[in-house]
Every structure is written in structure tokens, then in C-alpha cells.
Image (spheres, helix red, strand yellow):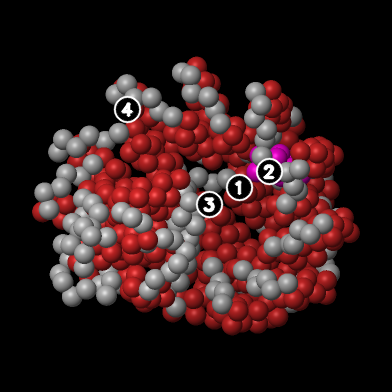
Amino acid sequence: MVLGSKVSRIPCLSHFGVVHQTNTMATLSDSLSVHSPSIAEPERHRNGTHFLISLRNLCRSGKVKNLDEALDLFQGLARMKPLPSVKDFTLLVGVVVRMKHYTTAISLVKHMDSSLGIEPDTITLNIVINCLCRLKFIAFGFSVFGNMFKLGLEPTHMTLTTLINGLCVQGNVAQALELAYHVENMGYPLDVYTYGVLINGLCKMGDTSAALGWLRKIEQRNWKPNVVVYSTIVDGFCKDGLVCEAFNLWLEMRAKGVLPNLVTYTCLIQGLCNFGRWKEAGSLVNEMMKIGMMPDLQTLNILVDAFCKEGKIMQAKSVIGFMTLTGKGPDVFTYNSFIHIYCLQNKMNEAMKVFHLMISRGCLPDIVVFTSLIYGWFKDKNINKAMHLLDEMGKMGLLPDVVTWTTLIGGLCQAGRPLAAKELFFNMHKYGQFPNLQTCAVILDGLCKGHLLSEALSLVEMMEKSNLDLNIVIYSILLDGMCGAGKLNAAWELFSSLPAKGLQINVYTYTIMIKGLCKQGLLDKAEDLLMNMEENGCLPNNCTYNVFVQGLLTKKEIARSIKYLTIMMDKGFSVDAATTEMIINYLSTNAGDTKIREFLFQKR
């Protein structure tokens, strides 16, 4: 048996659920005891040395084709007399890991230890820790790490790096940093690769400045960071919108003799395109090609998508021409860039032409493509065509995801069919999808704008009972609906309860309540709330002031209107179209009132 009755020296392996999770585990014992003729066994050779040499060559050259062949080789090792060293077994287990059969690799190590008496060495246990981390059993990985000391084995920097990487992959970057500090203080040196893992983890959690700090630590130790480390931070800066910092680091790495690779160029091109810096992005593409580095499909798709978003369709088409010449596409992402922009521009005939073109060229649309088209047809107020595409998705074996459902629900609400949208909302679970907060916000907004406040209130009550973590956006939508329906007292009660729910009231929510109070003529209370905003650290914005001034103008509170017009203009805000129209209407019906005329004349 693979899992023998003997107690293993590897901690916790006998308790792993992971070794029983797959059919492979259930049949592994049989696989090790049944002969397969695909790979010669040692008894077929005149001596076992020939077999070991063949096995080592197969493993190191990557010529072990699949798991069955790996298990045949393991069987061959297990039958040798005397048994080979732990290094040969570990070499083969490493091949199984590279095939991503992590649970199988763990069971093979267990079999080596408990059934064959082959004690694992540091490299073997490093492999086990790596498998456990990849299976997201980090705690068990630390158990194996602790047992190394009991076995008299010294962890290597690879042991520590594997555990640190496992923590980072799980999002526990703070724990990974703590571990790094701790082991270095204990005298276990980390290397540039470990620091690279920490830099990657920090960038993924959005702390690029801290990642840059670790890069400087690498330099202080006179280690040479490689292109991967630099590219990771360049990408982090670009995602943070800090393109200048990314570009400066790109120049720095080149000055230090680290040549950018395709990933570095692609990250920087993406960052430049996001900020409309087309000339610089184009210069980078030209530079790549001058040094013999051809942009790949991902790089070209970034350019296509960026051009489409800016409405530069001809430039996007020229990139597709380059793709065709170099045999690099287009793919589904490329086509969707065009479809998405055509849908936004209400050019649905053009969008459908691209849709049919991609199918005719053997490029099947994905959920994103269908969702873009469904959104476009709803925007075009063509519900039938939108729902027809939903049927087409089903015929192609594609199930709508939560984004598609949210698009459908939002489209029906905009088409004036909030009850139909509500029905879809409650049927999502039948298709294996559950609404997220965005979906909830969309249906709630649709119900409120459809004058179905009681339905909206019932929905929020149901959400609260289901322990959904509702945010301020959800309650702001509901407050807007309540104020619009004249339920000001109930709205005020809900508004007052928000801090107790752990929610921070934002400027949008304050503005909704000020508008509701003004609508009911409660100008003093609205003014008090405006004052309270600043006291609570929430500064009124342009919309807030315009809403309040409109309330004052409605009640012909001219002196106060001028007061707040002055305040908002001193703060750099301007009157919007609605406020301007109200001022013009007031002047046309109150020609004798010179106060606003004088104010406007002074401000010219």
C-alpha cells in the first residue's frame, strides 16, 4: 500500500485530506504494483546502474511524458536491490511536481518514507512544502518545516522562500514579511529570489512603494536584481497610475545593465496607453522592434484596446493589420475591444459585423463579448435582440456570469421593466450565479426609479437578513428613492442610523439628504446638514452646493442664494446647468430685483 500502517516521520502527512482527494490517490497503490511495459524496469538491464543513468537522463531532459510513466519509473526504483539513494527518488518526485500532480507527489514521498524506509532529505521536504503551499495547506507546510529540525535537517533559503511565497499567494503578505525578518534575525540568510517573492507580493497588494524599498535593500546587499524584479515594480507603478515613476525605474534598470524584456515593455506600454501617452507608447514599440524584440499578441491587444477606448478606430485597425502580417492574431480580446467601443457609441450594426466576422474566422465569442453586445442592445433600447443573444450564449454552451446578469438586470430597468428585472434577480441562483453588491445596487436603483419603493425596501430588508455586507452605495440609492417618494421622515431615520451600521457617510449621501430636505422646503435643516458635513470631515462638492442653491432659489431666498453662490465660487466651484436655468427664470419673472444682477455683474 502507498499509505502504509507505519507511522511516518513526515508530520501530518497521514492526516492530510489532500492525499485522498483525487482518483489518482485511490489508484496510486495499484499503479505502483502493476507492471507497465512502456518503460524498461531494472531487471531488464544487466545492472541497475544503467537504469539509474537512464532515469536521471529522462528526468533532467524533461522526457518523462506523463504521470503513468513517472509512476512506472518510481516502481522501477522501488524494486531495485539495494534501493537507490533518496536523491534519485527525489529527482523523480520533482518531475511529478512539475506536472502539477501535487497530491501524488506527497503520497510518493510518504511511500518512500513509510514503506521503503527511504528517509527524506532537505530537498525532499522542500518539495513536500512546495506541494502543500500550492495546495494552499500553508499550515501543514509549516509543520513539515518544524519537523526538519527534529530530523536534524537544516532548512535552506529555498525552504524559507517557498513558505514566504505560499503566504504571499494566499494574500498574507504581512505574515510573509514578518517571517522574512524573523528568519534573518535567526541567522538564516535569504537571497535575491526571496526578496523578489516579497516584492511580487507587495506589488500585488498595491504597496508598490514598499516593494521599491525592498529593491533598495537588494542593492544595499550588493545583489543584482534581475529583470523580473524590476518588471514587477514597473507593473505595480503603472497599475497605481504612477507612470512617471515606472518610466524612471525603467531608465534606471537600463542604466544598471539590466535589459528590459517583453514583459517590462508591455507593462510600460499599458501604463502609457492608460494615460493617453500614445507617442511614447509607439516609441517603445518601435524601440522593441529595433532590438529584435517583436511585440506579442498581448502587447498588440493593449494598443488596440487603448486606441478603441479613445475612439481612434483607424489606428486600432492598423494594429490589426500588423497582427495579420506577423501571424499574431487577432483573438477574442482584440475583437471585443472593437465590439465594446461600437456598443458604447450606439453603433450596433458595426458591433454585430465584428461579431459575425470573428465567428467566420473561427474565433468563438466568450462571455465578455456577449455581455458587451447585450449591454449595447439594451442601450439601443432593443430588448428583443438583447434577449436573443442570451439564447445564443446558451446554444454555444456559455452560461452568463454575474456581470452578464447584472447587465441584463440593468438593461431591463432602463427599459422601464423593473419587475422583470427583479424576476431575473431572484432566478440567478438557478443558473449557479449569485448577485454581488453591484447587482444589488442596479436592481435597487431600478426599483426606486420605477416608483416601486415598497419593493425596494423589502429587497434591502431581505439583504440585511441574509447578512450581506451592504455598503454606503446601497443605502444611498435607497435614501434617494425614499426622498423622491416624499418619505423624508423615514429617510432621515435611516440616514441617522448609518453610522451605527459601521458606514461612513460620504458626500454623495449627504447631498441626497440635502436635496430631499430642500424638496420639502426644510431649508434651515438642509443648511445645518451642510454645516455638519464639514464638521464631520466630509467636504461639500460642486453638486452639493448647486443642490442647496437650487433649493434656496425655489423658495426665492435670494440673499442666501447669493451668499452660497459666493461661497461656492470662492471655493472654485461653478454653477451647473440646472442652477443657471433657475437664475435666468428668476430674472425673467423678477426684472425689478437687482440683487442677483448686481452679483452676477460683480463676478464677471
Furthest residue toward top = 255
Q: CA distance from mark 1 to mark 2?
A: 49 Å
Q: Amino acid at mark 1?
A: Tyr
Instruction: Report which quarter residue 223 is drawn in.
Output: top left
Q: Residue at x 20, y 41 (%)?
A: 183
- Name the secondary structure under disc 2: helix
Q: Nearer the viewer, residue 292 or 27?
A: 27
Q: Which residues are magenta?
A: 297-309
Furthest residue toward front = 46
- Name the secondary structure under disc 1: helix
Horizontally, residue 372 falls left or right of residue 551, namely: right
Q: Which residue is mark 2?
A: 297
Q: CA distance from mark 2 to mark 3?
A: 43 Å
Which of the labelled discs sits on residue 507, or is there none? 3
Q: CA distance from mark 1 to mark 4?
A: 49 Å
Q: Are marks 1 and 2 in contact (CB under 8 Å)?
A: no
Q: Amino acid at mark 4?
A: Lys
Of pointers 1 and 2, the one earlier in the residue sequence: 2
Which of the labelled discs sits on residue 327, or is there none? none
Q: Position of residue 292 (x, y in %)?
A: 66, 26
- Name the secondary structure under disc 3: helix
Question: Crowding near pointer 1: few (<14 within 10 Å), some, many (20+)?
Answer: many
Q: Which residue is mark 4?
A: 217
Horizontally, residue 586 falls left or right of residue 558, namely: right
Q: Residue at x 33, y 62 (%)?
A: 43
